[in-house]
Image (tube, grey):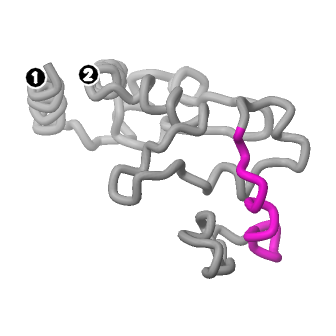
Amino acid sequence: MIDAAWQRLAALATRPGATAIRAHFAADPDRARRFTATFDDLTLDFSKTSIDSEALVALLDLAHAAGVGDFRRRLFAGEAVNATEGRAAMHMALRAPADAASRTPAPWPPPNARSCAPSSPRSTTAPCAAPPVSASRPC
């Protein structure tokens, strides 16, 4: 099923005019509203990309076929989804508000996540993005 989803998306990308963003705006005066999503203070504006309704549906179909929803559920549940390291991902805990533990299943975020957080609130990298491998390896 995932192969078919990729093939459909690849076929859509080769359509004539598939990248003509100005043409999309000319054909759809409501494009900015239809291709913008907002959640709290996060805004995603896809209108200024070459995506159209058919491509958006194809992308969502691909995400469904790839199991993104299940992976996201497991990630937020604190399961060990990092296949290369066999542990839970920590980047969400590092950027979570201090009271996030009350909204997430235990043991999320791990107890040492805050001590490993970067000093700058705008930083996107952390000096220690995961718990120590052993007690002898500090953050």
**Which of 30/88 is in front?**
88
Percent x, y of residue 121: 82, 67
Kind of residue indicated by mark 2: Ala
Which residue lies under the disc numbered 2? 65
Residue range in magenta is 107-122
Disc number for residue 130? none
- 117 within the magenta span: yes
User: At 80% across and 62% down in the image, what residue appears?
Assistant: 114
Q: Nearer the viewer, residue 95 or 75?
A: 75
In the image: residue 114, left or right of residue 137: right
Q: Residue at 74% across / 60% down in the picture? A: 113
Under tag 1, what secondary structure? helix
28 falls in the magenta region: no
Q: Which residue is mark 1?
A: 4
Distance between mark 1 and mark 2 Cα atoms: 9 Å
Magenta: main secondary structure: loop
Which tag, 1 or 2, sits closer to the chain's start?
1
